[in-house]
């Protein structure tokens, strides 16, 4: 797990609001207010919401991308721009990058279960086109979570003592517990620079 800092996202004098991005990329949402928060697991009382999960799977067969793009629905292929077929499904709302080697990347799911379900649906589409596609080595590669800390942050003070940045992006999470742990570690620093309300 690493912390990436974004020096450009909010310039000097900006309030930064109370939104903070936590995860392996970027996002913006609020905590899950539907269920009571387990304070033993989330001492801050805030649970970062998963916004995007990137997973990979090996279909274990060579693919003719041009043929797939012509026969599959919601598929596009422009080999001059990118060496993969881009496929989309609505439920769960995701995008897949399908490579000629049989490797596939699935992105856009909001839970681990939805990521696996979407990857299986893409594999089934490839199977229906006549390929002996399997479902090998499914793996979550990256997760993005976001939350609202519910208070404005004095970015000037935070920037002065912790470098010039406004957005916090924690990268490299492979499981949701890593996102939660990273957030709980950074939360006390944010509360230290909480803006006084007038």
Image (tube, grey):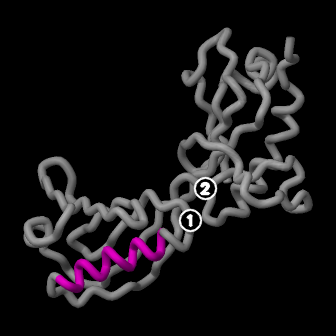
Cβ–Cβ under 8 Å for marks 2 and 1: yes
- Give the Cα separation between the discs numbered 2 and 1: 7 Å
Image quadrant containing the N terminus: bottom right
* Image vertical order of residue 75 relative to residue 18, above or below: below
Q: Secondary structure at mark 2?
A: strand
Crowding at mark 1 (Cα within 10 Å: few <14, some 14-19, many 20+)? some
For the stretch drawn in magenta, the main secondary structure is helix
Instruction: Name the residue beneath numbered marker 2.
Output: 50
Horizontal relation, residue 198 to residue 109: left or right: right
Q: Secondary structure at mark 1?
A: loop
Picture quadrant where residue 193 is located: top right
Query: Percent x, y for residue 150?
Result: 77, 34
Query: Percent x, y for residue 149?
Result: 76, 37
Query: Percent x, y for residue 190?
Result: 81, 32
Image quadrant containing the C terminus: top right
Instruction: Name the residue beneath numbered marker 1.
Output: 111
Instruction: State which region is magenta.
Output: 115-128
Horizontal relation, residue 131 to residue 103: left or right: left
Horizontal relation, residue 89 to residue 168: left or right: left
């Amino acid at each position: 797990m690493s912390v990436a800092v974004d020096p450009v996202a909010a310039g000097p004098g900006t309030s930064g609001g109370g939104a903070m991005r936590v995860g392996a990329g970027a996002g913006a949402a609020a905590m899950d207010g539907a269920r009571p928060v387990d304070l033993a697991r989330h001492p801050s009382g805030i649970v970062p919401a998963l916004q995007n999960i990137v997973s990979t799977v090996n279909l274990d067969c060579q693919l003719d991308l041009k043929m797939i793009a012509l026969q599959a629905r919601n598929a596009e292929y422009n080999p001059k721009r990118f060496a993969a077929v881009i496929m989309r499904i609505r439920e769960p709302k995701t995008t897949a990058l399908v490579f000629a080697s049989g490797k596939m990347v699935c992105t856009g799911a909001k839970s681990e279960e939805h990521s696996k379900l979407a990857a299986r649906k893409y594999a089934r589409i490839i199977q229906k086109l006549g390929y002996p596609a399997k479902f090998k080595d499914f793996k979550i590669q990256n997760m993005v979570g976001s939350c609202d800390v519910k208070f404005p942050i004095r970015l000037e003070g935070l920037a002065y003592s912790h470098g010039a940045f406004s957005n916090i992006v924690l990268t490299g999470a492979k499981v949701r517990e890593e996102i939660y742990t990273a957030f709980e570690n950074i939360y006390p620093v944010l509360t230290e620079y909480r803006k006084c309300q007038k």
